[in-house]
Image (tube, rainbow, N blue to C red):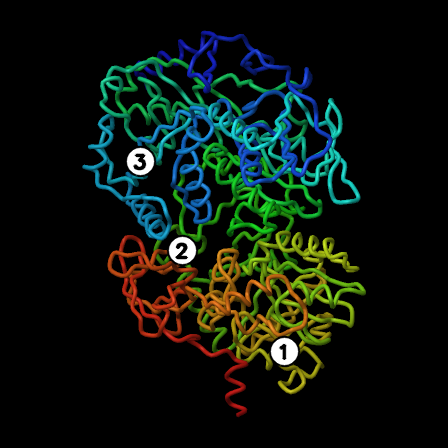
Amino acid sequence: MSGILYGRCAQYLLRSHPVYQSGCSKLRHVAPFSTGYITHSSGGQDATAGKLNKRLKETAEVLIIGGGCVGTSIAYHLAKAGMKDVVLLEKSELTAGSTWHAAGLTTYFHPGINLKKIHYYSCKLFDQLEEETGQQVGFHKPGSLRLLTTPDRMDEAKYQMSRAGWNQAVQELISPEKVAEIHPLLNMDGILGGILNPDDGHIDPYSLTQAYAIGARKYGADLYMPASTQSLKPREDGGWDVETEHGTIHAKVVVNAAGFWATDVGRMVGLELPMVAIQHQYVITSSIPEVEALEREPPVIRDLENSYYLRQERSGLLFGPYEKSHMMKQQDNWIRDGVPQGFGKELFESDIDRIMEHVEGAMKRVPVLQKADIQSVVCGPITYSPDVLGMVGPFQGLRNFWLACGTGYGIIHSGGMGKYLSDWIIEGEPPYDLTELDANRYGNWITKEYTSTKTRESYGMNNAIGWAREERWAGRPTRRVSGIYDKLKARGAEFGFHAGWEQPHWFALDGDEAGYRQSFHRSNWFNPVGREYEMVMNRGGIIDISPFAKFEVTGKDVHQYLDNLVANKIPAVGRCSVCHILSPKGKVYAEVTISHLEEDKFLVITGSGVELHDLRWMEDFAWKGNYDVKLNNVSDNVACLSLAGPLSRDVLSTITDADISHEAFSFMDVKRINIGGVPVDAIRISYTGELGWEFYHSSEDTAKLYDALLEAGKPFGVSDFGTYALNTMRIEKGFRMWGQEMLMDNGPLEAGLGPFIKLKKKADFVGKAAIQKVKDEGIKKKLVLLTMPDTDNVDPEGNETIWINDKVVGNTTSGCFSYHLGRSICYAYLPLDLATEGTQVDVELLGKRYTSTVVKEPLVQTEPARTRQQNK
């Protein structure tokens, strides 16, 4: 390893470190701040004290803590929407923290689906902010290229392209020849193609934040600085007393948008937010003749295999690596001790050695770097949550306390996140599904050690291939394991991670290839899942579904509370019902199962991933309605095993004295019985659609209950199965899944949930008027089931684009290989005129379109339906 660049890097490190000032693109040399920090002096106020820029208001509808790009965006959007008394507090000056030194990349691309909407809105907003506010924002749109240099990368690109068509942004898969044409500085060795987003680019973060601030003030918001938040005290009316060194503001809503200071703000209200400040470095070169000679700015590149981004900066280049987990550096001491007093516009000492592997890769891919001088190396803190994504929305257990923090990509998220939160705060419901950013997805299972370990993994895998069905293992398992975790592991369980829980996806038995073989095609799980499917459908199986979230709901108002909360009828004592919590606009906020255990006692069950998402809504509804109810989250104390399949009654009868005949224990009944010496609340229900029960019991008894079920099942050929087989059976049986077929993007009538929506019941449940209006006016799209031809060893998973000729007509929601049909199937939303049996459409999978047919559902009748037909 030699090269002119490395030699000049070494020489540079012997000199004083310059600081790149994003706002004006100037460089200046500064002295070290303290113990490894380098400070940027802007002539502004001290970070913690100073004269306030204007008199402090006494009240606020919404008070935002933090003057970075996210905080100012929220203020701008709220004020523009017409909210009065919007206040923003900044402890020092706007952009302090991570915003001021960010590289400012903007992109329409995101591997997820919902965040594409955030990116799209942000980019479109950046286009018009300058005209609206008069503030130049330095928005460049040369496009961006994701370089594809391996067959697996090409598969990943096709996987992503299949999800891009039904979204708004333009995205293209281009040839090597096209890559070379639009980026003449690249060494084309090994490049197989690229993903092009032609309207991507970069923006000046400092100017962007100033534009948000100017817009916020224009529409009536008040921004105060320096105004450090000293304490937050909850009020009886649900608001907050926000104490600053300049006085106290009474706020109805508080939004924590304080960047890496959000952890300190969180501690003021008893929260330990899972966030870490990571030292991210990028390099800026001096002028390069070949760059200066370009007729137009080349696209930003993301060299995925070498894990760096690179763009033009004036007549030079800027490139930023994401080093591997064992090389990167994060501020773990900030997790423990908080952000150092006075830290604001400071940088860390750069360390070229940490990123030399990526520097060398960049020099090979962009050869002009080999003779370039380094002008500066910026090493500043950026904030990561364990999964890299922000925490956005109201926080469970704290009335009117919202989060907008934890994102490592604040620039591109700022516009969309500000709009999303503004709409939610004003309208009372999220404008669309964004549960991957839910502020409550981390529960009390999170530890500082997990946060540190997981953020390190996530940063180091920033540009890793995002495989289908991928599992990442750092920090696992957490304390959230069921009482049979070790037994299941010994029996071949291959686990998935669900809200801190380990749950078997499938089982690798003797002769099977264990582990997850990474692929976008069917992999080593395929045959074992087929074996489990056959076992359950023909005999029976046992599955651990302890990760389900479970809430006990009691109190004198419990009947009225639940009746107004959900759209279905409340079950009688000893019965259960599948119910839906709707938003005021008639979207599906949650699906829950309600079991009526005693006269004033109910058990509400929901998915593991939305435990606190649903509980927060339920608590808020109880508080606003002044209901005398108590909600007790028993998710960690109550476990659940399920037994399902045609022989499940035979198996169960050998280990219980209870009458479990169809006549005595009918579908949707709930009974307290004893199984193998373990008391359980047994519900005759199964997501497989087959004869089955769910057994809710004390988590201390899980091993005893499992052993009894397993031993009793042996003579019948009944054993373990996992969630992959479960998912196949639920799709074949016509069961929807929240977050896939039903969510805040769709209404219940579109999703085929009409039988669960009781518009004639007396209770004025949330969303009733909105659903009645939709019913009167008619739906415009509908969920359908599609069968597919031979799909070349690839199965749909959801979010694939659906075409007729070259026109996008819909999208899939979930899919699988149907072991019953011997071919792939999927759920999809189509316009009403296409949602008829026999209609043929093309589903895009890994770069190919497969002609698929709308069929009548369900493919397989459920056991209760079959029983009713037999008894006619």
The amino acid beneath tag 2 is Asn
Residue picked out by circle 1: 652
Identify the residue under disc 2: 799
Q: Are marks 1 and 2 in contact (CB under 8 Å)?
A: no
| Quadrant position of the N terminus in the picture | top left
Label 2 near label 3: C-beta < 8 Å?
Answer: no
Q: Residue at x 48, y 49 (%)?
A: 471
Disc 1 is placed on an element classified as helix
Frontmost of labels 3 and 1 is 3
**Could you say which is closer to the camera, residue 446 or residue 172?**
172
Q: Position of residue 573 (x, y in %)?
A: 73, 75
Query: Residue 871's spot in the image, x, y percent?
Result: 54, 91
Q: 10 Å neighbourhood of mark 3: few (<14), some, or many (≥20)?
A: many
Q: Does residue 217 lie above or below 78 as drawn?
A: above
| Place of residue 156 in the rendered image (x, y in percent of width and height, measured from the top left) | 34, 47
For label 3, the residue is 145
Residue shown at the point (70%, 54%) measured from the top left: 619
Is residue 376 placed above or below 360 in the rendered structure? above
Which is closer to the viewer, label 1 or label 2? 2
Q: Earlier in the sequence, mark 3 or mark 2?
A: 3
Name which quarter of the figure residue 832 lies in.
bottom left
- Work out how far the residue at label 3 is from the one at label 2, CA to CA, in angstroms: 23 Å
Q: Amino acid at mark 1?
A: Leu
Mark 1 or mark 2: name the one nearer the start of the chain. Answer: 1
